Image (cartoon, grey):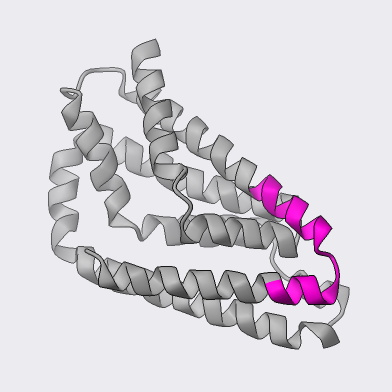
């Protein structure tokens, strides 16, 4: 049990720690809205990691083989969604000076959770990653504990990202600071979208 749980923890941190588009989105949501919304988004990413860990434990090799033929369309969909988010973030930054506080925070925790969950599920590399780990370890038992460890590790990291985003948001509360962070976030997300299309 403890061995499978620790393996899951290591796997969860391994997939969550590299800062990519999802981490940028979570930090940006926290900075522009609230810790509650950012944390919900982080838990959406962690749920996706947990789902893919469960799929990998249940039949990683078979699932990875099924996903492989559609990996390119999924990559294009993911890139299109990211570019849309980048444009939406930039547009919100441009029109923000004239909006009210209520309009400035339209994202609810539930919408943030569902949106980041869906976006993270578009990454077929995650299930391949977990499948490789499971198969590399010989597919030994303790699957439930592996999934639990992966989810807890991913969730703890995503919540740390959300908390960091909230701190940044408090430090940069002025209109200029929010404009700058929104533009930086949209540029980074756009670059990551382009990179998603040019790699793999």
Most common SS among magenta residues: helix
Q: Quadrant of residue 107?
A: bottom right
Q: Which residue lies at the image location 70% right of the left edge and 57% below the top edge?
A: 30
| Horizontal relation, residue 57 to residue 23: left or right | left
Q: Quadrant of residue 66?
A: bottom left
Q: Position of residue 193 (x, y in %)?
A: 40, 71
Residues 8 and 93: in front is 93
Q: Which residue lies at the image location 41% right of the left edge and 39% below the top edge?
A: 50
Magenta residues (range): 162-180
Image height check: is 196 above or below 17?
below
Q: Give the tally of numbered discs.
A: 0
| Horizontal relation, residue 173 to residue 188: left or right | right
Asked whether residue 176 is drawn in magenta, I would say yes
| Horizontal relation, residue 12 to residue 199: left or right | right
Q: Position of residue 78 (x, y in %)?
A: 37, 69
Q: Which residue lies at the image location 20% right of the left edge and 24% below the top edge?
A: 137
């Amino acid at each position: 049990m403890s061995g499978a749980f620790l393996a899951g923890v290591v796997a969860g941190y391994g997939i969550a720690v590299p800062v990519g588009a999802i981490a940028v989105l979570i930090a940006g949501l926290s900075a522009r809205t609230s810790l509650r919304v950012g944390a919900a988004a982080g838990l959406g990413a962690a749920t996706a990691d947990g789902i893919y860990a469960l799929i990998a434990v249940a039949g990683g090799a078979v699932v990875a083989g099924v996903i492989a033929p559609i990996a390119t369309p999924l990559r294009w969909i993911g890139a299109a969604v990211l570019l849309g988010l980048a444009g939406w973030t930039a547009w919100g930054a441009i029109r923000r000076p004239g909006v009210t506080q209520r309009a400035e925070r339209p994202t609810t925790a539930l919408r943030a959770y569902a949106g980041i969950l869906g976006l993270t599920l578009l990454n077929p590399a995650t299930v391949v990653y977990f499948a490789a780990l499971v198969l590399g370890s010989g597919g030994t038992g303790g699957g439930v504990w592996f999934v639990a460890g992966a989810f807890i590790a991913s969730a703890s990291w995503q919540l740390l990202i959300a908390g960091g985003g909230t701190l940044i948001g408090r430090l940069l509360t002025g209109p200029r600071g929010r404009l700058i962070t929104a533009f930086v976030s949209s540029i980074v997300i756009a670059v990551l979208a382009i990179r998603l299309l040019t790699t793999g």
